[in-house]
Amino acid sequence: MELALLLLLVVKTVSGCGVPTYQPNTSRVVNGEEARPYSWPWQVSLESFFPTCGGTLIAPNWVLTAAHCITFHTYRVVLAEHDMNKEEGPEQSIMVEKMFIHPKWNDNCVSCGNDIALLKLEKSAVLNDKVQLACLPQDGAPLAHNQPCFVTGWGRLYSGGPQATTLQQALLPVVAHNVCSQSDWWGSSAKTTMVCAGGDSKSACHGDSGGPLNCKGRDGKWYIEGVTSFVDGRGCNTPQKPTVFTRVASFIPWISEIIAQN
């Protein structure tokens, strides 16, 4: 009986998602700030010869990122990373075994959508208080206009500015599709398979690609609702050009199929 109880506890812990041990500081984010260490425990750094993108741990051996991030043959992910310039102790570095880019992705047309990829890791991450899984939304789940979500990553602090060395977070309210697709916003570049969030003074920036748009559900858990895809060519903080994310809820069948078959 004790063995059965132990196994149940282990399974329950592994299947849990979206509940950080270290709660993120979400009370006073304006234009972005350094995140509380390990408060986004599913955030990964995707690295080839150097850090290139972000990603999200959605299963112990699966990471979700952007298709446009995959330009090299060999990658590793680093989990429990906070300060890029320091070896802080809890980091886990795991090589990527297989890469699955969405079959409809066209690297000559980012605004055509399908900017999503799955990475199968060589071994499972060790889940602990600093490495945890994000929850995936339900297939087709909607997001409300102005719903508060957070982008996280080590991207540039502003257009043309320095790359962040510590993990940053910024509050990006969701911009509804019927607003984002207006002609003086993103127009036809904003697809229903995308999520627009932020705009004006708050946005993702170069280097944040592939990382998560974290939105808190009614159940109190954090869901990865978006994968950071693109910003306006004129700059990261262009008014009426919010950051555009791949809408994860539009790709749940594809994600489920890839994981089930591999």
Image (cartoon, rainbow, N blue to C red):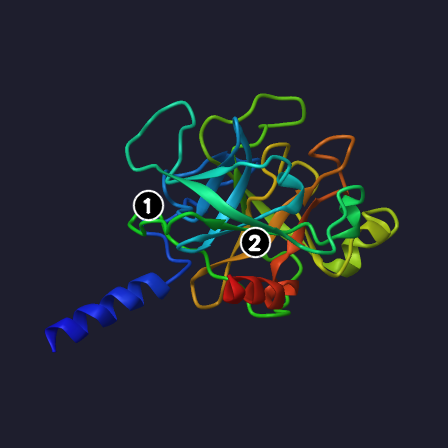
Q: Which residue is drawn at 66% across and 53% down?
A: 246
- Is residue 203 visible to us here? no
Using a 10 Å C-alpha cutoff, classify the residue at mark 1 as few (fewer than 14 neighbours), some (14 to 19) or many (20 or more).
many
Element assignment for label 1: loop
Element assignment for label 2: strand
Give the mark toward the camera: 2 or 1. Answer: 1
Q: Residue 207's spot in the image, x, y percent?
A: 59, 33
The amino acid type found where label 2 is placed reads Pro
Q: Mark 1 points at which residue?
A: 130
Using a 10 Å C-alpha cutoff, classify the residue at mark 2 as few (fewer than 14 neighbours), some (14 to 19) or many (20 or more).
some
Q: Residue 262's spot in the image, x, y percent?
A: 51, 61
Between 96 and 187, which is closer to the camera in this rendering?
96
The amino acid type found where label 1 is placed reads Lys
Q: Residue furthest left?
A: 2
Q: Which residue is drawn at 61% across and 59% down?
A: 248
Q: Give the mark nearest the N terminus, 2 or 1.
A: 1
Q: Mark 2 points at which residue?
A: 148
Q: Residue furthest right?
A: 183
Q: Residue at x 64, y 32 (%)?
A: 206
Q: Is residue 43 above or below residue 142?
A: above
- Is residue 78 visible to us here? yes
Residue 153 located left or right of residue 2: right
The reply to whether the C-beta atoms of the residues labelled 2 and 1 are less than 8 Å apart is: no
